[in-house]
Amino acid sequence: MKIQKKVLLIILTGILLIAAGCSSEQPKKSVQKNETVNKIKYGIVEAKSLKIENIRGIGYPGNDNGLYVASDQGLKLFKDSKWYETTTNKHEYIGFQALDKGFVTSGIPQKGTGYKNPLGLVQSVDKGESIKKLAYYGDLNFYFMAASFSGDAIYVISEQPHGELSQGVNYTKDNGQTWKKSAFKNFNADSLGMMSVNPTNGDIMAMATRSGIYYSNDNGNTMKLITAPIMVTALTFNGDSLLFSSVENNSILLKKENTSSGEQADIAIPFLDYDNPITYLSVNPKNENQIAFTTYRNDLYESKDGGKTWNMLLKDGKKELE
């Protein structure tokens, strides 16, 4: 089973595209010096303008009522038709996953905040004001993660053995205290890809690959191909169903699949160029009609009616605010 050196996600025209805008190389360990930024009081304020160069993930944490966008410049929040940002703790979030009680993430800390680089696996339950160190703090970053919304399971991809981590997919059910390797039996794709976990059952996970979606109900120990051998660039659970984006016949598509029956339904989306595929998908577990997705060019769309209509929130990562 081959793990790509730079990305495990999107392959178009035979070229590896870096959907998250990052390399798998781990940053050098360092302790950031306390600077004036450490004296800035944390708050969430309305953004005067917005320009995001790299979107690292999106989600709907259960302890807030908005859409969170994790970026290389910290958290950006869209709620009540307005954009907000944090005053400090503008960490370069990586592998961001929304949970019922907040979010888990990895990443590179903002200079001057006093956190070690890399962050390892950390969790926030107060909208990013503070982070709890779960595992591999100051040791590793996890560019590819997935977590159950209930918080009962977290999955990561490790490119090489490290501590308790084996090469490949590993999972924890106790917030990083102990880890187990997913055996990935019957997995025949030639690379690993984006993962998603059932919001209420952490044993159930799925992986997008360039040869279809593989599904597991036993923590990735046994995998089953549940779609045609198509290139899938993003996926997320919508209840017990899967919402996913594929690239077929030079078109970017969005589909929903019933994982029990295998029945699929197309969801209409705004036209996307072939070289601007969907990179992240998110469904609000507390309101499954609320869906969002980002694209390779950092466009962001949201629907509040299950995909019948879409609102463009960002164009090329930008939004001029009045």
Image: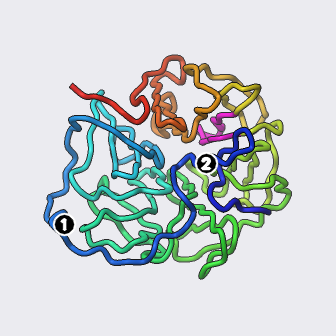
Q: Report the residue at 69% width, 34% height from top.
A: 246
Q: Report the residue at 40% width, 49% height from top.
A: 71
**Residue under numbered circle 2:** 198
- In the figure, residue 267 lies in which quadrant? top right
Extent of the magenta region: 232-246
Total number of numbered discs in the rendering:
2
Q: Measuring from the top left, give residue 174's x and y in whole percent.
A: 53, 70
**Magenta span: helix, strand or loop, mainly?**
strand
Q: Measuring from the top left, give residue 185's x and y in whole percent.
A: 83, 61
Amino acid type, residue under disc 1 in the picture? Asn
**Residue under numbered circle 1:** 38
**Is 117 situated left or right of 264 in this image?**
left
Identify the mark nearer the N-term, 1 or 2: 1
Q: Nearer the viewer, residue 66 or 276?
A: 276
Q: Say above or below: 28 vs 210.
A: below
Residue at mark 1 to residue at mark 2: CA–CA distance: 37 Å
Residue 255 is one of the magenta-drawn residues = no
